[in-house]
Structure formats: C-alpha cells, structure tokens
Image (cartoon, rainbow, N blue to C red):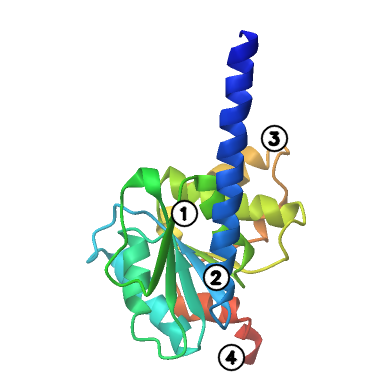
Amino acid sequence: MSFFGRISLVVRTFFRVTWSDFQLVHGIWKIKKIPGPFVSIFGGSRFAIDDFYAKQAHLLAQKFVASHINIMTGGGPGIMQAASCGAIHGKKSTSIGIGVTELKEGKNPCLKEYFEVNYFYTRKWLLTHYSIGFVVFPGGFGTLDELAEVITLIQTNELPMVPIVLIGTQYWQYFMRWLTEEAMAHGVVTEAHLKLFTITDDLDKAFCLIEQTCDKL
C-alpha cells in the first residue's frame, strides 16, 4: 500500500472509531436516563409474531414490566418485537430498542424508546453492559454471537456474574450436545462454563432467575 493509501486508511479508521465512540456515549446517555433495571432479550428476527417462541417472549416481557424491570432488545422484528409488545403496557417500566442502520429493519411498532447505531459492536456493548440478566430465545448466528459474547465477557470478568437464561430445551438440545460431547471432550469448555447459563421452558423459572428470587418460591 502506498504512503497516501495508508494515510487515507488511517483517516477513515479514525473517523469511524470516533463516530462509533460518539454513538456509544449517546447510547449510554439514552439508557441511563431511564430509571430502574434492565433485562436484555435476544432472539431471532425471522420468527413470525404468532410463533410459539414469540408468544413466550411476549409473556415473559409482561412479567418483567409488571415487576418494574425494563426490556432492552435490538429493536427489530421477530422475538424482539414480541418482547417489546409484551412490555408495552408497563406503567413504571419501558422497552428500549437499539437498531443497526445497515440492517434496515427499522423500529418495531411496540417500542417506547428507540435509536440506531452504525456498528454491531456499539449495539452489543450497550445491550450487554447495563442489564441485570439476559434471556436468549431461539435464533440464528446473530443470537449465538450475542450469547457467546455475554458468556465470554463474564468468563473474563468484563461483566459481573449475572443470570443467563436460554428458553427452549428442545431448540437448544443439540447445542448442549455439542458442548458436552465435543467441546468438553476436547477441553475447550469446562463444566464450570456450562453453569454460567440455564436452559428452561419454564417462564416463571426464567423470571425468578433474572429477578434472583427463586430461593423465595
């Protein structure tokens, strides 16, 4: 690469990083002005709103807002919309969505707060650093990426030890099979790592794990 080519690359990268940092600070400002705790809900954008898992996301979000816990999602369709719609009648809590401009998904109709960022990195940072827990519904590569990021951040002490709940024992069964029969067998995952998250179909259990009241039931 020529000298001027390198200068051009450095300048473009500088402005990209600066703009990303500005959006990150703006996102922190938007989140921190909302009182009360947050739970982040992840899941596939391609689920129809009447899908079983979408209905479960709707019901679980209702439970959270009834206990004054705000809902945070990626702001798009599918599981994200279902959770936002479940939270729409919260009186002392709200739902916030953080979109990514390049996805062109736009704001789902049930969100009370919404803003967009340009980069996935910025959205993931915001979705992971202000939540008291995480609920992961079925999804594709994006959902797996978010799940892996949260677990890795907890493993490396970048995030506190907070509950991570995966909804759908049938959906996640082969993921668990790979973890236990392949990843653990090769020593890249330990039994302690598997204790960082819980898989369940029980929405009440998911709720109390996030609220950390299961010992009271």
Q: As drawn, is 59 to the left or to the right of 117? A: left
Q: Circle 4: is it few (<14), some (14-19), or many (20+) Cα within 10 Å?
A: few
Q: Circle 2: is it few (<14), some (14-19), or many (20+) Cα within 10 Å?
A: some
Residue drawn at point x = 68 percent, y = 43 percent: 184
Residue 184 seen from this side: yes
Please give the residue where the numbered disc 4 appears in the rendered image.
217
Q: CA distance from mark 1 to mark 3?
A: 20 Å
SS class, disc 2: helix
Question: Label for residue 45?
Answer: none
Q: As drawn, is 164 to the left or to the right of 62? A: right
Q: Amino acid at mark 3?
A: His
Question: Label for residue 31?
Answer: 2
SS class, disc 1: helix
SS class, disc 4: loop
Please give the residue where the numbered disc 3 appears in the rendered image.
186
Q: Amino acid at mark 4?
A: Leu
Q: CA distance from mark 4 to mark 2?
A: 31 Å
Q: Amino acid at mark 1?
A: Trp
